[in-house]
């Protein structure tokens, strides 16, 4: 019963985005952002722990927020020009269409329908994770099939909702799907016992269990519902804008690969070991050509927010409350899948 609703949502989103896609053809997103004096990125309605979370003082943190701050540093040289707009999952595409946000950096995957039906384009993946299921340990579940006849909580209006529906259908498992809009309410429903299981992106489940009253009361089932690359998402038609997103991400990864951090970037810029790194840090001209950015934009990114490792560790890793390993999100030379484009 849920599939027609999902298709209807996609169709409405496609209609809503059509007018702004025409505007994006003009390639004016960077100019709009510069004239406004701020980069508008999505937060969450509440907190999406590790990715976009807000404290009692209204300060936003998390890897999605850090990527927004990195892009802001590339554009303005100062991350304080980042403006975080709290929106829920269903609002991502209308907010992009209306211009309320300039880019979607909100734990969102690159999918065919978002590309061909919504008219969106994607950056390289900045996080690769699997969709998993957590269940109450007292139920004695060993796989999701053991939960047949029970209920499963999912975040509404997300690719996770579709992945759960497809997985259950493909494996002949009948369950009640409880789709809830706000992430905090999804978790509350599961932890209160409203649902037997909870499907989400693997990192989110691990964080949710670690922050619960009794982590041992929950078990992560072995079922892998899907593999999803999380990407930054923009409207089609503005290639320069998605180029800026991709090169900002590459700068974070290249700096990590070359051992350039927020602490040593000034020293390396003064005495670059190679011509490539000298150009990367703006010691010699050329890096901003074709992007509409200053030649020292990558230096500004690293000096202001650090490299990818620094961002990950304080958001999700060993410097965060969640103590998550990098796993597949490590660099290519450390057993992972992430890599930078070439700064020639």
Image (cartoon, helix red, strand yellow):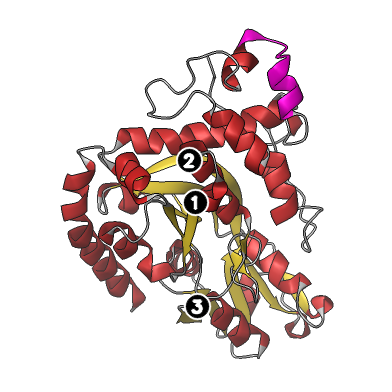
- Tag 1–tag 3 contact (CB < 8 Å): no
Real-space CA distance between mark 1 and mark 2, rounded to the nearest whole angstrom = 7 Å
Compared to residue 291, the image places residue 97 above or below, namely below
- Return the residue nearer the eye: 86 or 93: 86
- Tag 1–tag 2 contact (CB < 8 Å): yes
Real-space CA distance between mark 2 and mark 3, rounded to the nearest whole angstrom = 32 Å
Mark 3, residue position: 182
Mark 2, residue position: 76
Task: Give the residue displayed 47% in from the left and 56% down from the top.
Answer: 108
Q: Position of residue 57 (x, y in %)?
A: 64, 73
Task: Judge left or right: residue 156 versus residue 200.
Answer: left
Q: Nearer the viewer, mark 2 or mark 3?
A: 2
- Quarter of the figure with residue 303: top right
Q: Secondary structure at mark 3?
A: loop
User: Crowding at label 1, few (<14), some or many (≥20) Cα neighbours within 10 Å?
Assistant: many
Compared to residue 185, the image places residue 122 above or below, namely above
- Give the extent of the magenta segment: 265-275
Who comes first in sequence, dot 1 or dot 3? Answer: 1
Task: Judge left or right: residue 115 versus residue 178.
Answer: left
User: Do we see residue 316 in this rendering?
Assistant: no
State the predominant SS element of the stretch in magenta: helix
Real-space CA distance between mark 1 and mark 3, rounded to the nearest whole angstrom = 27 Å
- Quarter of the figure with residue 144: bottom right
Task: Judge left or right: residue 219 versus residue 180.
Answer: right
Task: Give the residue displayed 83% in from the left and 76% down from the top.
Answer: 216
Residue 81 numbered mark, or none: 1
């Amino acid at each position: 019963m849920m599939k027609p609703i999902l298709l209807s949502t996609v169709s409405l989103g496609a209609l809503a985005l059509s007018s702004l896609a025409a505007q994006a053809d003009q390639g004016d997103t960077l100019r709009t952002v510069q004239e406004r004096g701020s980069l508008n990125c999505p937060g969450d309605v509440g907190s999406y722990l590790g990715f976009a979370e807000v404290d009692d003082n209204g300060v936003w943190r998390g890897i999605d927020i850090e990527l927004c701050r990195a892009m802001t540093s590339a554009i303005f040289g100062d991350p304080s020009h980042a403006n975080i707009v709290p929106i829920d999952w269903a609002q991502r595409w209308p907010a992009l269409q209306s211009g309320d946000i300039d880019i979607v950096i909100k734990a969102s995957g690159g999918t065919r329908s978002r590309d061909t039906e919504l008219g969106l384009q994607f950056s390289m993946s900045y996080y690769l994770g699997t969709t998993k299921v957590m269940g109450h340990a007292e139920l004695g579940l060993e796989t999701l099939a053991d939960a047949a006849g029970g209920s499963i909580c999912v975040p509404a209006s997300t690719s996770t909702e579709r992945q759960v529906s497809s997985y259950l259908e493909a494996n002949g498992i009948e369950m009640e799907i409880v789709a809830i809009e706000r992430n905090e309410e999804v978790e509350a429903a599961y932890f209160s016992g409203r649902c037997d299981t909870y499907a989400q992106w693997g990192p989110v489940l691990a964080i949710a269990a670690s922050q619960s009253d009794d982590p041992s009361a929950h078990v992560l089932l072995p079922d892998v519902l899907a593999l999803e690359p999380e990407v930054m998402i923009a409207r089609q038609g503005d290639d320069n804008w998605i180029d800026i997103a991709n090169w900002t991400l590459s700068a974070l990864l290249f700096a990590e690969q070359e051992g350039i951090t927020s602490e040593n970037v000034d020293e390396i810029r003064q005495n670059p070991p190679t011509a490539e790194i000298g150009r990367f840090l703006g010691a010699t001209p050329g890096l901003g050509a074709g992007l509409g950015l200053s030649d020292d934009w990558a230096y500004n990114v690293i000096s202001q927010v650090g490299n990818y490792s620094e961002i990950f560790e304080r958001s999700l890793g060993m410097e965060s409350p969640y103590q998550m390993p990098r796993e597949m999100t490590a660099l290519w030379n450390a057993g992972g899948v992430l890599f930078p484009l070439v700064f020639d």
